[in-house]
Amino acid sequence: MRGRACINRLFTPCPASCCSPWERRSTLRGETVVCGSTGFLSQDGRNAKRHPWPERPRQQPNPRPPPSPADSQEALLDRALSLHQQGQLAEAETLYRTVLDQDGRNPTALKYLGAVLMQLGRPQEARPLLLIAAGHDKNDPEIFDFLGNALAQADEKQKALESFCRALSLNPTFTSAWNNLGMMHKRFNEAPQAEFCFQRALSINPKMTEALNNYGNLLRDLRRFDEAEKKYNQLLDVDPYNANGWFGLASLRKSQRRYAEAAELYLKTVKYRKNFQDAWLGLSSAYFFQGRLLDCKYAIEQALIINANNSDALDKMGTVLIQLRDYQEAEKFYKASLALDPNNASVLNNMAGLLFKSRRYREAFDTYSRCVSLHPENAMAWMNMGELARRANRPNQAMEYYKKSLEYRPDYPEAISNIGMIDIQFSDLDMAESRFRRAIEIAPDMILVRDNLLFALNYKASITAEELFREYQIYNDIVEAKTEKRFTHEAHPRPEGRRLRIGYSSPDLRAHACLFFIEALFRCHNHDRVETFAYANVSEPDVHTDRVKAYFDHWIDVVPMNDEAMAQRIHDDQIDVLVDLAGHTGGNRLPVFVMRPAPIQVSYLGYGYTTGLTSIDYYLGDENLTPPGSEPYFSESLWHLPPPMYCYELDESKTIPVNDLPALTKGYVTFGTLSRTIRLNDGVLLTWKRILDRVPNSRLRLDQKPFVEEATREKFWERLETLGIPRERVELCCTRPHWAAYHDIDITLDCWPHNAGTTTLESLWMGVPVLSKTDRPSVGRVGASLLCPLDLGEWVVDSIDEYVDKAVAYANSLPLLAELRHQLRDRVKTSAMMDPEDFVSRIENAYEQMVTTWWAGR
C-alpha cells in the first residue's frame, strides 16, 4: 500500500503522536510550588536567599560538627533552618528529625520537615507530619499552605482547597498560598481559577518570581504565547539568573517549534543551574527535533548523571538510540525505564514500536496487548495493534482495533486516517475520502493525512481531471503557507569544470517495487559526469538498502532529520538537481522541496502524477505518459524523455519459467489481475462482467494480499454478487510467491482510472499479455507508457467498449495468445526498457539540459 498509515512516531513520523517521549512532561516540570515565603519548593535555590524567615532569625553557616544529643532544641532547630536555607536538604531533614525525637509535637520542626520532604519528592511522608502540625497550631497560615501542597499532590483536591482557604483566611495577602492554590487549580486543569490565583498573588507582589513563572507556564499551556513570554521576561527582569525563567522561555520556544532558539535558552538554563534535569531533557527534545541526535544523546546522558533512575529520561534515550539505529541498546533503556515504571503506557508503546521495527511482530503484539490490558483507554496502543494487523494483511482485524481506538478517542485523526486506508483495501474510496477529510478537519496541519487523501483520489473514477488537480493545488497552498524558510541560489557554483551534483530523495531504497525501475539508474550513473547523493528516508533498511548504498557517492540518512535540517543539508551539499522519487506516498519529504534547497527540482517515478508543488520545476516522463494536452493537470513543467521513461530490472533467478497457455489444458479462458484492490472500482468490475458474459465459461482470478483473510474474501464475493457476478466464476486468492499466479492466467486485465505499473511488467515477463484502457493523465496512461515501447500498442484502448471487444477477441484467439506467451519475455529482455546504459545516458542528458536552461534564465 503506497499510502501511509499513521502509527507511533517510532515507525512513521507522525506529527501528532501523543506517545512521543519528547512531548511528555510531568505536571510540575519547570513549575514552581512555593512553601511559604521561603521558596523551598520553587525549584530555584536562589529564591531561598531572597525571602526572610517569618519565625526564626537567619543563622550564618556554621562549620561546627553535627550537634550532640545534649544540644538544646533551639540550637538544633536553628542549625536545621540554616541548612534548609542553604539547600542542604538531607542534612536539614536529619536535624529536624533529631528535634522531633526530643519533642514529637514541635510545630516548627513538624512544619519544616514536611517542607523538606515535599522538596525531596516525598509528599506522602510529609502529609502526616503537616496534619500533626496543623492540629497543634491552627493559626499558622504557612502550615496550611504546606499541607495544601501535600494534599494536592496526593490528588485530594477538596481537602487541599480547604487547607489553602484556611491559610488565606488567616492571611489574605499570603502570596505563597495564592500561588500554590493556583498551582493546584492548574494541576486539575482549572485554568480560569488558576489564572485568577496567580493574578491575585502578583497584585500583592508584582515581583514574585514564583508566581510570574507559574503564570507564564499556564499561559504557555493555553498557547497564549505572547502573554507567556511577557511573564517570563518580567521574571528575568527581577532576577536575570533565575533558571526557571530561562527554562520557561526555552519551553515556550519549543512549544512554538522554534527548536534552535529553544536549545540556546535551555543551554542558558543549565548554565545557571547545572543539575536542572528537566532542562537537560528539554534540551534533548530541542536537539531531537533539529535532527541533532548525538547532541540529543549527550543531553540525555547529562540528565541521567543527575538521576539515573528517571524513567522518562531512559525512555527518551531508547527513542534516540532507535533513530541512531542502535536497536539493542535502545531495548536496554526501554527495559530499564519499564523496570522503574512497569505499567507506563507510553514506554510500553515505544517498546512495542522497537519490537515492530525489529520485525519481532509477535512480541510487539504482546507488548501492545499488555499495554491495553493495563490501560484499556490507551487509544494509541489500540491503533498500533491495528497497524500490526494491517501489516499482516488482516484488514478486518485491523479495522476492529482502529475502531477500538476511536471508542476511547473519537477525534483521533491518525486512527480515522488509518481506517481510511483499510477502506482503500476494500475499494471503498468514497468512505476513505470521507474519513481522510474528517481527519483533516480535526487536524488541518497533519500533512500525512492530506497525502493519503490525494493518494486515494488518484484512484477515484468519479472525479474529473480538473477536480483532482484542484485538490493538489489546495495541498500546495497549505504547505506553502506553513513553510517559512526559503533558500536562494545566487551563490550557487557554476557547472563548468565539475560534475553535476544530483540528489535523490526517496523512502524506497529497500525491498520495494520502485527499486525494479530505478536501481539501474543508481548503478549505472556515469560518475565522471555526475556526483550522486542519496537522501535516504528509509525507516526500515534491509539487504537491498546495503546494496543500493554502494552505488552512491554520498549516502545521507535523513530519517532523523526534520524537514528544515534536511533542506539545509541539501543546500549545503550544493545540489544542482534534486529529484523526488516518492510523490505523496509513504515516507515522502515533499515539504523539504517547498523550501527549494536546490535550484532545479524534479518529480520522477514512484507516484505517477503531479506533486502539486509549484516549487518543483519538472515532471519527468515521456509522450506516452503525458501526451500533449496534459499540461493543465500538472504544477510542474512536463519534461519528456525519449521513450521508454523506465528501466526495468529484476532478478531472473527469483522468477519461474513461462508455461504454456493454461486455456489449452483447462478448456476455458482465465482473465486475471494481481493489481491492488484499490483499483477495483465498480466501473471496472462491471466492465469485466460484460467480458465474462461474452466469453462462455471464462473465469476471473483476482490475486492480492488482502484475500489471504477469509473475511475479506467473503466481503468481496458479496460485493461481486451485488454487481451480478456469480462467485463460482471468480477466484479470490493470495498466491505466494506471486509469480506462480500467472501460470493460471491467460490475459491480464488492467484497471482505470489508475493503471497498474509493476504488475503489468511482471505479467509480460511471465508471458501474459495485458489489456489496458487509457484514462486521465498521467496515472491513466501508465499502461500505455509500458506497452507501447514493447510494440504492444494494439493492447492499449481508449474506450470501455473497445476494451470489452478486444478482450473478447483475444479470448477467442487462443493460438495467438499461445504464441505471444512464449515471445513476451524475450521481447521485454531485448527492449530499450532493459538497456540501462542507454536509459541512464538519456536521464543524464536531461539533467544537463535542465541545468543549462536554469543558468540561461538567470
Image: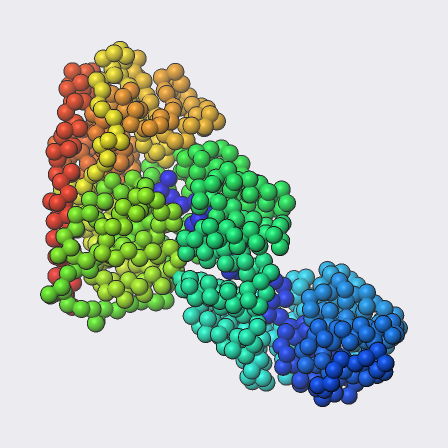
User: Is 19 on the left-hand or right-hand side of 392?
Assistant: right
User: Is 842 on the left-hand or right-hand side of 194?
Assistant: left
User: Can the viewer see residue 96?
Assistant: yes
In the displayed structure, would residue 206 be above or below residue 222? below
Relative image position of residue 409 (x, y in whole percent): 57, 48
Q: Quadrant of residue 598?
A: bottom left
In-front residue for pair 28/401: 28
User: Is 631 on the left-hand or right-hand side of 123?
Assistant: left
**Rendered-image quadrant of the C terminus:** bottom left
User: Can the viewer see residue 193?
Assistant: no
Q: Quadrant of residue 689?
A: top left
In-front residue for pair 179/19: 19
Count of numbered circles on the image: 0
User: Is 19 on the left-hand or right-hand side of 852?
Assistant: right
In the displayed structure, would residue 344 be above or below residue 2? below
In the displayed structure, would residue 582 be above or below residue 242? above
Relative image position of residue 523 (x, y in whole percent): 20, 47
Residue sitting at x 15%, y 33%: 829
Relative image position of residue 428 (x, y in whole percent): 42, 35
Residue sitting at x 48%, y 48%: 354
Residue sitting at x 44%, y 46%: 357
**Rendered-image quadrant of the N terminus:** top left
Q: Quadrant of residue 628?
A: top left
